[in-house]
Image: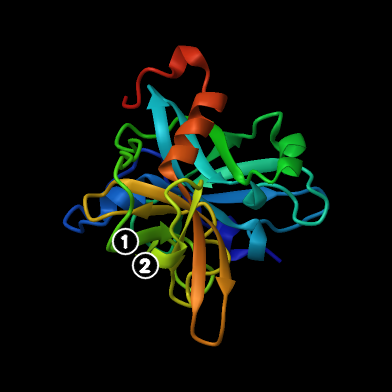
Amino acid sequence: DVCSSDLKRAIAPDDRSYLNTSDPNTPLQRSVVRLWPTFAGSKTSGIGPLLGTGFVVRREGDRAWIATARHVVLDPNTNAPPTKLEAELYSGVLPANLLPARLSVVLPTAAQSDASTGDDLILLEVKGLPADMGPFPMASDPPQGTLKVVGHPTASTPWAVLAVKLVADLFDPAAKLFRLSGPPTLNEGASGSPVVDSRGQVVGLVRTRTQLDESTYVVSAYRTGAIREKMAQMVPASHGSRSTP
């Protein structure tokens, strides 16, 4: 049998004709990618924990770096790297005969060995991003008030924009992580999502979600300081001075 997806054509990465330019969330969604890893022996990618989110944190020309959670790009059973890793780009609502563009993503060679340290934050490299997919600006102030998470939780639609709030009693300014109260729909697939404030600046990156009781969910997120540290470690020095095309 021929799969229906085999009859569809992927649009070009720089095709912006289907974007809703009047939607204030479109610029946020445009700099967020959907990560599709394929592992050895897996016929289908992107199922359950194998689907994740990433967002652009730095770029130079067509070369860019995407922040995400390490566990979404390594095999959850063997910790093995994927045989193929792709980033799907946000292109708006497409006709039924078209598919979003995907680009190949480079996983750092140290990704597998570094997983044993417990550090779940990682940067991926990708080339060929359209010029409008700029890096998110990072907030310098501690997160506060109502925030947004932009990602791909499996219980919601891709590129969902969900409201979350800071859990004040679990916020530690000295820690790499902070906690958020999240809706039940913020589940698998949201790992690696940016946490964005009202100015469109990133205040963190979603790591995990924990259910405390029937109606209470707490999301842990890396603070921007941790993201900046990772950028200093993983982005080559020759590319460290500029963050915009």
Q: Residue at x 53, y 33 (%)?
A: 230
**Image: 77 above or below 227:** below
Residue nearest the viewer, comparing 105 with 69: 69
Residue 143 drawn at (x, y percent): 33, 53
Mark 2 residue type: Val
Placement of the C terminus among the 4 image quadrants: top left
Mark 1 residue type: Leu
How many other residues sit within 10 Å of disc 1, few (<14), some (14-19) or many (≥20)? many
Image quadrant of residue 112?
top right
SS at mark 2? Answer: strand
Residue nearest the viewer, comparing 230 with 123: 230
Q: Which residue is mark 1?
A: 147
Q: Which residue is mark 2?
A: 164
SS at mark 1? Answer: strand
Residue nearest the viewer, comparing 63 with 118: 118
Q: CB atoms at circles 1 and 2 under 8 Å apart?
A: yes
Check residue 5 in the rendering and tell me which mark sits there, or answer none: none
